[in-house]
Image (tube, grey):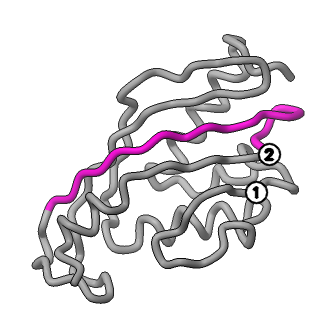
Amino acid sequence: MTADHTPDAKALFEAWLQLWNGDLSLAPEVASDDFHVHSDMIDGSDSRAIRGAEGLAEFVRAGRSHTPDLKFTVEVPPLFDGDYLSVRWTATGTYDGSFPGAEAPAGTVVTFTGTDTLRIRDGRFVEYWLNADGLRMLRQLQVA
């Protein structure tokens, strides 16, 4: 599949956005068995351990764990180039008080931005490059 402006690529991206907005059941529809992530992780762990649909679902679940109502909105619509797409997003959610080392009170609204670059093969994502402003989020959570 070529990820240009085809309806399939657009539908795949819409499912990706719904997944990040909390519908973890979509992970098998968007991620291939050999899906993997390229990112600097906020906890210092190795992103290469995130594999396949199950790994993606756990990654999303963990990312939403301290802000259960986290909502991702598209800031710059997806740009398609061959098998790749890139999108700029904003995430906003209400902090639940559970992030280790955070001094912000529960109920604090946090907002941060990022860019996803994804590679498509055979109708699903196989690679994911994540660049998110984790420092902005940590500052809002008042992490010491």
The image quadrant where one finds the C terminus is: bottom left
Residue 115 position within the rendered picture, expressed as x and y whole percent measured from the top left: 48, 40
Residue 66 position within the rendered picture, expressed as x and y whole percent measured from the top left: 33, 73
Q: Which residue is mark 2?
A: 126
Residue 70 position within the rendered picture, expressed as x and y whole percent measured from the top left: 33, 56
Residue 37 figure quarter:
bottom right
Q: Is residue 77 magenta?
A: no
Identify the amino acid type marked 1: His
User: Is 33 left, or right, of 22 in this rendering?
Assistant: right
Q: Are marks 2 and 1 in contact (CB under 8 Å)?
A: yes
Q: Residue at x 63, y 22 (%)?
A: 10
- Is 101 above or below relative to 87? below
Residue 38 figure quarter:
bottom right
User: Is 142 left, or right, of 78 in this rendering?
Assistant: left
Indicate which disc, 2 or 1, sits on the residue closer to the N terminus.
Answer: 1
The image quadrant where one finds the N terminus is: top right
Q: Is residue 123 magenta?
A: yes
Q: Which residue is mark 1?
A: 36
Helix, strand or loop under label 2: strand
Q: Which residues are magenta?
A: 109-126
- Is 109 above or below relative to 112? below
Q: CA distance from mark 2 to mark 1?
A: 6 Å
Q: Nearer the viewer, residue 20 or 47?
A: 47
Q: Residue at x 79, y 53 (%)?
A: 35
Helix, strand or loop under label 1: strand
- Is 84 above or below relative to 26? above
